[in-house]
Image: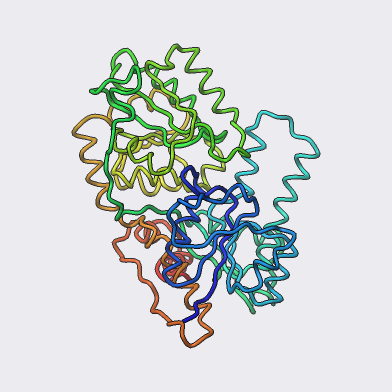
């Protein structure tokens, strides 16, 4: 029997080596393929996975000039970006259009420009405005918008009012607020995790079997503050020479993404303080997706430090979810959603203020303390299933099943209720001010 067809547009690589966006669309496609015929499309053919990469969905190169050939038989399209022509085609052909706003790109782009170290020019302003303008169009043409957390809900609603796209008559016909749903990044909590070989302890020169490893799990982008972490390691190196900091995957797997200035500055500082390859270890090549498990299981703690910027306020640090996957305590700076509203209140690690190397140094020592570490791991075990893809994308799947149910063979399912003890549900109940509280809880539980 025929099923509805969904096209997910991935703007990044999927395969053995992939970063956040690729990971997201790989798992989203796998989850939705239970109920739909799912294809993941790539405007750039070099982003397609190898044939040997295991998946439950189809993949194809979507040639942008001939996009109609790929869009025309689809019932829904999920994308971070579509051209004006593509959006008009979707509307004319009643293709349900979902814009994925899990990362607020206007904020990310602002941070990229401001933290690049380059002079702000008229061209910079023009490029930023063009990106900004795209989102005005997305809200005019989109049917559904995906968010990671309630801060982003506040941001996008403010954006919508600020750009003037909200009108009384338009809102009466089609309330924008009702078209946001929670669809954050997730983990596969049912995955069987095995440490198949040592990759750090006793393998990397300078890292001993008895050392305590603190892992930086991803790239070093300009909005991160890896330099404060280097300074913290310099503080503790003499008293705790057994604590080793490891960065894995500094070089992005997508060759189109350049090495950022913060990465270069971090390496230079580690060399300047004579920490490189004895206290601080930097692996430049991206660790393959499955291979990362060996690193995570070998580590004693993980770390995520950022600058105090608006980017942090609106972010959803997806790399931290890998820490939850293996019950790995996290040392993090405050400011972002996961640090402030998940890690700190649930004692899943230690959260310190940004740009404070002394506090960070103390946190690194405390997090590897055996008693503290064990307690935090037990706390993570209690909540990690809440972040499973089947939970974080439940409202999206439910919503699509119901919205695309225009043929009798598609079953209308009951609302997917996220259990009230789910950590994200509890956060919504605790922190969201009335009258938004009821609305956000409904988004988390029912997708609308």
Residue 167 position, x and y percent, is 70, 71
Give the colour scheme of this rendering: rainbow
Depth check: 41 or 355 in front? 41
251 up-or-down from 139: above or below: above
Q: Is residue 336 above or below residue 87?
A: above
Is 317 or 339 nearer to us in this picture?
317
Residue at the spot 42% in from the left edge and 63% down from the top edge? 31
Foreground: 232 or 10?
A: 10
Q: Residue furthest right?
A: 122
Q: Residue 45: image x %, image y %? A: 63, 51
Nearer to the camera, 91 or 139: 91
Task: Pick out the residue farthest to the bottom.
Answer: 408
Residue found at the far front of this picture:
51
Kindly identify the residue that appears in the image at 18 percent across and 34 percent down.
371
297, above or below 262, in the image: below
Q: Position of residue 208 (x, y in %)?
A: 27, 20
- Looking at the picture, does residue 377 appear above or below residue 147? above
**Which residue is rendered at x = 76% and y = 42% of the image?**
125
Is 125 placed left or right of 304 in the picture? right
Image coords of residue 215 (percent x, y): 37, 32
* Left or right, 186 with reference to 313: left
**Tally of marks:** 0
Farthest residue in the left direction? 371
């Amino acid at each position: 029997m025929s099923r509805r067809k969904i096209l997910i547009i991935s703007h990044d690589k999927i395969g053995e080596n992939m970063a956040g966006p690729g990971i997201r669309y790989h798992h989203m496609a796998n989850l939705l393929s239970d109920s739909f015929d799912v294809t993941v499309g790539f405007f750039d053919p070099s982003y397609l996975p190898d044939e040997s990469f295991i998946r439950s969905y189809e993949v194809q190169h979507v040639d942008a000039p001939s996009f109609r050939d790929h869009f025309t038989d689809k019932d829904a399209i999920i994308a971070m970006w579509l051209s004006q022509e593509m959006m008009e085609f979707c509307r004319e052909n009643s293709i349900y259009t979902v814009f994925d706003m899990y990362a607020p790109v206007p904020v990310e782009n602002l941070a990229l420009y401001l933290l690049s170290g380059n002079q702000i020019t008229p061209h910079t302003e023009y490029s930023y405005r063009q990106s900004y303008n795209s989102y005005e169009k997305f809200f005019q043409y989109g049917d559904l918008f995906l968010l990671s957390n309630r801060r982003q809900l506040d941001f996008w609603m403010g954006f919508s009012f600020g750009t003037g796209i909200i009108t009384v008559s338009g809102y009466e016909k089609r309330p924008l607020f009702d078209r946001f749903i929670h669809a954050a990044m997730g983990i596969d909590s049912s995955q069987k995790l095995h440490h198949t070989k040592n990759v750090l302890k006793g393998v990397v020169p300078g890292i001993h079997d008895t050392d305590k490893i603190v892992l930086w799990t991803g790239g070093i982008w300009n909005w991160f503050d890896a330099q404060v972490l280097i300074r913290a390691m310099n503080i503790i190196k003499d008293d705790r020479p057994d604590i080793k900091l490891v960065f894995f995957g500094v070089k992005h797997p997508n060759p189109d993404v350049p090495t950022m200035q913060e990465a270069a500055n971090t390496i230079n500082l580690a060399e300047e303080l004579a920490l490189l390859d004895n206290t601080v270890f930097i692996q430049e090549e991206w660790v393959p997706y499955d291979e990362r498990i060996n690193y995570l299981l070998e580590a004693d703690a993980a770390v995520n430090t950022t600058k105090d910027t608006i980017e942090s306020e609106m972010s959803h640090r997806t790399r931290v979810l890998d820490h939850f996957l293996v019950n790995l305590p996290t040392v993090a700076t405050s400011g972002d959603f996961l640090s402030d509203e998940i890690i700190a209140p649930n004692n899943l690690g230690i959260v310190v203020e940004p740009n404070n190397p002394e506090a960070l140094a103390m946190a690194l020592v405390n997090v590897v303390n055996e008693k503290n570490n064990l307690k935090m791991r037990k706390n993570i075990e209690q909540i990690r299933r809440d972040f499973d893809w089947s939970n974080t994308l439940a409202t999206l799947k439910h919503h699509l099943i119901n919205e695309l149910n225009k043929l009798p063979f598609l079953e209308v399912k009951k609302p997917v209720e996220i259990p009230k003890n789910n950590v994200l549900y509890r956060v919504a109940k605790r922190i969201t001010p009335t009258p938004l509280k009821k609305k956000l809880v409904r988004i988390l539980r029912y997708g609308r």
